[in-house]
Amino acid sequence: MSAALLYRRFAVALAIVGASTLAFGGEWRVDLDPEQTRLSLTLKATLHTVDGTARLTSGWLVIDPETGAAAGEIVVDAASTDTGNASRDKKMHGKVLLSAEHPKIVFRPDHFQGNLSPGSNTGVVLAGEFELLGKSHRISVPLDIRIDGSHFEATAEFPVPYVEWGLKDPSTFI
């Protein structure tokens, strides 16, 4: 990977901790409760790391472990993204996320790969369309999942190629 591309491609680490309704059987259904779900993010930049949070608007997911089929929609309120730095957040919303014009960040999964095991840590991959700035991008998201009763935790780390996806480069390094 070239140095120029490295500065324009940031990994996003996302942790979702949620109380949800889990239904087991042939298909697994997860209904995320926005009031009980916490979204945190970490942006690994050139010389520092930025931590933040965002609010879930709505979310549901259906997975068929036997066929690998998945369906669902996870919607995040783009304007709720907060890093705790008012100046940086103003720039992020006004110039990078354009959250006034594009108030939603949406993931619509359509394929699942892996084994889900209640009571243990499980690694799976969820693939689908990631909508940002009103445009969809194909993405595969590796998830580490822990299921305990009706509670689960999922963590993911995936690259967001800002410039390739039409976002202004948020780097202030160069």
Image (cartoon, grey):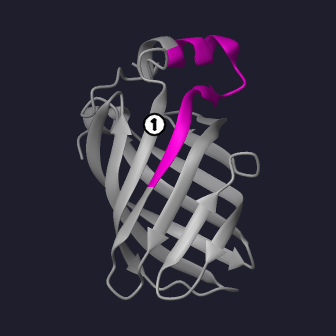
Q: Is residue 140 above or below residue 5?
A: below
Question: Which residue lies under the disc numbered 1?
Answer: 105
Q: Position of residue 135 (x, y in %)?
A: 28, 33
Disc 1 residue type?
A: Ile
Quarter-of-image position of residue 96:
top left
Q: Position of residue 27 (x, y in %)?
A: 47, 81
- Left or right: 150 as drawn, with respect to 136: right
- Report crowding for label 1: few under 14, some 14 to 19, many 20 or more residues within 10 A (C-alpha): many
- Left or right: 158 as drawn, with respect to 49: left
What is the secondary structure assignment of the residue under circle 1?
A: strand
Q: Could you say which is closer to the camera, residue 26 or residue 111?
A: 26
Q: Is residue 66 above or below residue 154?
A: below
Residue at 69% in and 53% down: 33
Q: Is residue 79 magenta?
A: yes
Residue at 54% in and 39% down: 76
Quarter-of-image position of residue 144:
bottom right
Q: Could you say which is closer to the camera, residue 173 or residue 99?
A: 99
Q: Quadrant of the C terminus?
A: top left
Residue at 76% in and 51% down: 36
Q: Position of residue 1 (x, y in %)?
A: 24, 47
Q: Which residues are magenta?
A: 73-93
Residue at 52% in and 19% down: 92
